[in-house]
Amino acid sequence: ETGVTQSPTHLIKTRGQQVTLRCSSQSGHNTVSWYQQALGQGPQFIFQYYREEENGRGNFPPRFSGLQFPNYSSELNVNALELDDSALYLCASSPSARGREGEQYFGPGTRLTVT
Amino acid sequence: SQQGEEDPQALSIQEGENATMNCSYKTSINNLQWYRQNSGRGLVHLILIRSNEREKHSGRLRVTLDTSKKSSSLLITASRAADTASYFCATVFVGANNLFFGTGTRLTVIP
């Protein structure tokens, strides 16, 4: 297992609500990336944080936002939830500057269901 | 889309046989990585191959990369029932900071 943890494990929300997902990166890692994985699909990049600054964003609307804290843990916030937001949300950390060069260490994910 | 595509989408083999999965991508890469995922949980990194490498081994895994064809393959030798999982290739494109994942291959190893 990696040292990346995510909370909660499972979450059920209603359309229109807001949700916050949390991720603690592996010790010594300063880069955190978030991915959305719909059922039966590969993960899709949402955004990346490097030393508390957003360092790249995928094709997701502004209602997906994030934060990285001084201890390099991170949050993913999703406003105005839609049914299509139902997915597994994965957090990954990496030790490399800007996360470009090496492998990423994934957490177990948060399963979000929007009803 | 910059995503890679894996082939086949699903593969079923007997224990002890070899499993080969292929990945194609569209744009120049810094590196290509293979990940494994059990039952829709977190991904586990298997192997990374850089754009200037052609072949890499790790235990029962062998990865090849052909940048002229923009393709890679993952070979798992002497498969075990515990190898049953989904396998994804992921690329780091030149100028990008993140992984672009393929659609995955679902491998079933029958005991």
Image (cartoon, coloured by chain):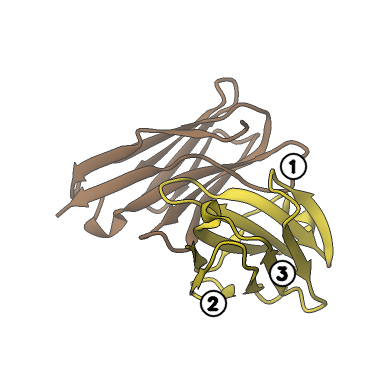
Q: Is residue B25 visible?
A: yes
Q: Residue A8: which numbered mark, if any?
A: 2
Q: Colour of chain B?
A: brown
Q: Percent x, y for residue B38?
A: 37, 60
> Which callout, 2 or 1, points to the residue nearer the camera?
2
Q: Is residue B78 visible?
A: no
Dividing the picture into quadrants, the one containing residue A82 is bottom right
The answer to whether residue B88 is above or below residue B8 is below
Q: CA distance from mark 2 to mark 1?
A: 29 Å
Q: Amino acid at mark 3?
A: His
Q: Are marks 2 and 1 in contact (CB under 8 Å)?
A: no
The residue that disc 3 covers is A29
> Which callout, 1 or 3, points to the residue nearer the camera?
1
- Label 1: element kind: loop
- Label 2: element kind: loop
Q: Residue B96: which numbered mark, if any?
A: 1
Q: Percent x, y for residue A17?
A: 62, 67
Q: Amino acid at mark 2?
A: Pro
Q: Residue B29: which numbered mark, if any?
A: none
In the image shown, does B57 or A97 lie closer to the viewer?
A97
